[in-house]
Amino acid sequence: MEIVVFAIISVVATVCAIFVISHRNPVSSALFLIATMVSLAILFLTLNAPFLAAIQIIVYAGAIMVLFLFVIMLLNLRKDEFGPERKRAQRFFAILFGFLFLILIATAIDVGLSTVGNPEVSTTKLAPAGVEMLAELLFTKYLFPFEIASVLLLVAIVGAVVMAKRKL
Amino acid sequence: MSMVPLSSYLILSAVLFTIGVLGVLVRRNILIIFMSIELMLNAVNLALVAFSREFGSADGQVFVFLVMTVAAAEAAVGLAIIICLFRNRKSVNVDDSNLMKW
């Protein structure tokens, strides 16, 4: 069951991600990015992280992408303002080094998994089971980062208003 | 119920991350470069959640939660910068804004 879901979703996520970077129109890119995020949310569900799946859809696919679409609308770009894309040679080398980078990460994953070995828990565990454990960690072990995150969000709000406003 | 091995999730995460890197390298539209950065953050989130299940602890999920918070803050500030840049240069092409000061 999980394998079937994973196979379908991984193909959908990869294809949508490729469309994100290859589509000319930023609005289409944003919509494909939403599709990628929703498919990742489904993967989070199969990975026993329902809270993160919900947050992924509400915060990422909801809030952040709506912000993106608002900015695209605000800039009101015409076709000729998209500008020319990179030159052929540059694109060729970018794709070449991208593949080399992928091989590098894949090798690192392979070496890492073979030296560390598969953990013993992997066969018995049926996941930390969701929200309760996450909440407990968030308010005990990770209380300080949690509070810092709220300060970060406040600073981000102030920074965004200061920068985007024409006259203060 | 058969489980998908950790390595499959990590490879998918690596592929998505590489697509994000490619987007930053290939595209000139600053909005799409920004979306590629979001794509990379999402790829890392997937790896963290996969590790969290593999090791049977929720710590990875807490990290993902914090990464999402940082991503939201980054999106707000980044898009404000893009609006500022567009107001000054009348362009979203990164090659038109390659000087820190003029």
Image (cartoon, rainbow, N blue to C red):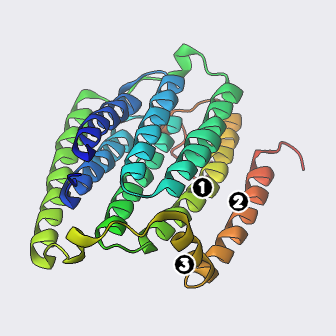
Q: Name the residue tied to disc 1.
A: B74
Give me the C-alpha separation between circle 2 and circle 1: 7 Å
Residue located farthest toward the right when viewing the structure as drawn: A168
Q: Name the residue tied to disc 3.
A: A137
- Mark in front: 1 vs 3: 3
- Mark in front: 2 vs 3: 3
Residue B35 placement, left or right of A75: left
Instruction: Label 3: state its secondary structure.
Output: helix
Instruction: Label 2: state its secondary structure.
Output: helix
Q: Residues within 10 Å of mark 3 (few under 14, many from 20)?
A: some
Q: Is residue A54 above or below residue B23?
A: below
Q: Residues within 10 Å of mark 2 (few under 14, many from 20)?
A: many
Residue A74 placement, left or right of B15: right
Q: Residues within 10 Å of mark 1 (few under 14, many from 20)?
A: some
Q: Name the residue tied to disc 2.
A: A156
Kind of residue indicated by mark 3:
Leu
Kind of residue indicated by mark 1:
Glu
Residue located farthest toward the top when viewing the structure as drawn: A79
Q: What residue appears at the point 61 percent right and 48 percent down from the top-left corner?
A: A59
Instruction: Label 1: state its secondary structure.
Output: helix
Asked if the residue at tag 1 contacts the one at tag 2, i.e. Cβ–Cβ closer than 8 Å, the answer is yes
Kind of residue indicated by mark 2:
Ala
Which chain hosts label 1? B
Which chain hosts label 2? A
The foreground one among B43 and A123 is: A123
Q: Is residue B50 above or below residue B63?
A: above
- Residue A28 at x, y percent in the picture: 49, 23
Q: What residue appears at the point 22 percent right and 55 percent down from the top-left corner?
A: B3
Residue B74 placement, left or right of B39: right
Can residue A3 be seen from the camera position used here? yes
